[in-house]
Amino acid sequence: MRSDKHERTHAAIIRRAIRFACKEGMERLSFSVLADRLGMSKSGVYAHFGSLSALQLEVVDAYCQWFARQTFGAVLAVPPGLPRLRAIFANWCGHIAAGTWLEVQPFCGAGEPAQLAVLASQQWLKALCAWRNRLAACVSDAMAARQLAACTDPTQLADDIYGLTVVLHHEVRFFNNADALRCTMARFRLMLSAAGACAERRHAPDHQDAIAPSRVELL
């Protein structure tokens, strides 16, 4: 039976692993890196997981739960339809701009159990599909409320919106584009306008549409 100290240490390792992976990429995550940052021995960190792939799987699972709470759970009080869709998108983009967005690529180190690496990638893809479905559901709600044109394809629009988050991630992480968030929010509004969105409120300035990076706290 695991002790409370073991559980606390395990949770601390996962938190640090997520923070590192969001900043540096999952492919650079290693037991040595975590040991250095936590002041532990490499063997001590390894003992908690048994393989790098097992660590990756736990990191993906914990991050997905956290992101879902922060991005979707946090807007449950927002009216359905366009208001909720805008709030979700703002939260999502806020995490990307703040550097708290995880990118998972198929990865398996030498000697690592390939099945666990596959499971981590599958878990990530499953989460992405679920989140895109949530976007599509918001679009459907907006159509039902006549906030979007009746001819709108919920799946297509959700995919297009998701595509904006991918571009934003690249602009922030790879191109260091300081104007990326503002441009993304502007493109989002144009996308909704093209889909017949009702101008139900005056928009705040672009940079205020997404949560401020300083307000984002990872785990």
Image (cartoon, rainbow, N blue to C red):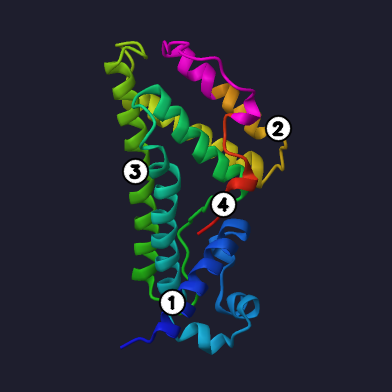
Would you identify the image quadrant in which residue 147 lies? top left
Q: Residues within 10 Å of mark 2 (few under 14, many from 20)?
A: few
Which comes before the other along the chain, label 2 or label 3?
3
The correct choice, above or below, for 129 with respect to 189 in the image is: below
Q: Is residue 199 magenta?
A: yes
Using a 10 Å C-alpha cutoff, classify the residue at mark 3 as few (fewer than 14 neighbours), some (14 to 19) or many (20 or more). few
Q: Amino acid at mark 1?
A: Glu
Residue at numbered disc 1:
112
The CA distance from mark 1 to mark 3 is: 27 Å
Judged by depth in the image, the label closer to the viewer, 2 or 1, is 2
Kindly indicate the quadrant of the structure image that contains residue 149.
Answer: top left
Mark 4 Cα shell of 10 Å, populated few (<14), some (14-19), many (≥20): many
Q: Image point 33% across, 16% down: which residue? A: 152
Q: Percent from the top left, x then y, of residue 62? A: 41, 62
| Circle 4: element type | loop
Disc 2 or disc 3, which is closer to the eye?
Answer: 2
Q: Nearer the viewer, residue 165 or 111?
A: 165
Front residue of 123/214: it is: 214
Residue topped by disc 4: 100
Residue 171, horizontal then vertical, whole percent: 65, 39
Specify start and end residues of the magenta stretch as a single range.
188-208
- Amino acid type assigned to the residue bearing label 4 in the image: Thr
Compare marks 2 and 1 and give the one earlier in the sequence: 1
- Name the one closer to the observer, 132 or 68: 68
Does the CB distance between marks 2 and 1 fall below 8 Å? Answer: no
Q: Residue at x 55, y 78 (%)?
A: 31
Q: Position of residue 155 (x, y in %)?
A: 33, 28
The residue lying toward the viewer, choosing from 81 and 76, is 76
Q: Determine the CA span between mark 3 and mark 4.
A: 19 Å
Instruction: Please determine whether, in this image, residue 39 is positioned above or below residue 93.
Output: below
